[in-house]
Every structure is written in C-alpha cells, then in structure tokens.
Amino acid sequence: MMLYSILVAVDVLLAIGIIGLVLIQHGKGADVGAAFGSGASGTVFGARGSATFLTRATAILATLFFANSLLLAYLATHRPVTESVIDQSVQVIEEVVEVPVEESLPEVQPVPESAVSDLPDIPQENAAPAADPDAN
C-alpha cells in the first residue's frame, strides 16, 4: 500500500514537471521573432538555444511518467484481495448461528377433529373473498 502511494505522488510530480517544461519552451512562432533580431537565444543554453535541452528534458520526463503510469495501472489491477469488515462479520455470524435443523424444530402434534368441529361458523359477509385463479 505504501509503494502505491509513493508511486502516485511521483506520478503527480512528473506531471507537474512536464507541464512546467512545456510552458517554458518557446513555440514555433518565437523563432520568427528571433529571425528579425528580437532576441539572443544563445546566451544561457549554448548556440542552439534552449530548444535541445528543454526538448530532451521533456522527453525524459514524459518517458518516466508513461512508465510510472503503467506500473500504477499494473499494481491497481493486481492488488491482493483483502476481506472487508462486513465479510468477516458475516463469517462470524454464520459460525455462531449454525444449529442443526432436527434439534431446533419442536415436534408437531396433529389437531384433533373435535377441535376443528367446535369452531364457530363464519358468516359470509365477514368472510374473506375467495381468490379468483383466472384473475391474472
């Protein structure tokens, strides 16, 4: 888990570095201005200017960013499966609740016919309507 967090932080730093390098670089239109004498590009980075150094640094950072992103994708899809707290509690409940069915049910006694014949008759107005099997 710690390695994954470190790689995410490195990925963010690489992305910020790439953004910074791209923003520093001159566009194609800047060369036209230099051709008319409005800039000395050979002062800090040599005769060719900053294009070679910045281009190479951007390519290196982009390669590192790409490799790091692939590693992060691999780690995200191949994480070890950990059980959640809910799964663990369900297992504990299943272990505690296991009771054999034969021991848990009481013995059923048949109802004597005299008890059924002693029941009062229900008047038709209070009786529940019979279900119509052809209704559906």
Image: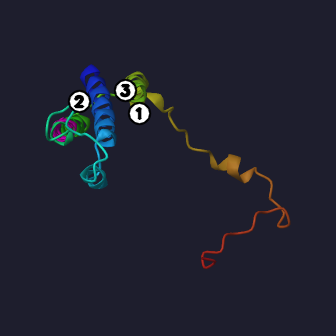
Could you tell me how far apart the alpha carbons at marks 3 and 1 are, in whole angstroms?
19 Å
Task: Indicate the position of residue 99 as horizontal and vertical percent values.
Answer: 41, 27
Task: Indicate the position of residue 136 as horizontal and vertical percent values.
Answer: 60, 76
Q: Which residues are magenta?
A: 54-67
Precedes in sequence: disc 2 or disc 1: 2
Residue 99: in sight, yes or no? Answer: no
Q: Quadrant of residue 14?
A: top left
Q: Nearer the viewer, mark 3 or mark 1?
A: 3
Q: Which mark is residue 91?
A: 3
Q: Nearer the viewer, mark 2 or mark 1?
A: 2
- In what element is the residue under mark 3? helix
Please name the amino acid that badge 3 sits on.
Gln
**Image point 55% across, 39% down: which residue?**
109
134 with respect to 80 (left or right): right
Precedes in sequence: disc 3 or disc 2: 2
Q: Which is the main secondary structure of the residues drawn in magenta?
A: helix
Which residue is identified by label 2?
Answer: 80
Which residue is identified by label 1?
Answer: 101
Task: Indicate the position of residue 59 as horizontal and vertical percent values.
Answer: 17, 41
**Observer-nearest of 59 and 31:** 31
Residue 64 colored magenta? yes
Precedes in sequence: disc 3 or disc 1: 3
**Image point 86% across, 66% down: which residue?**
125
- In what element is the residue under mark 1? helix
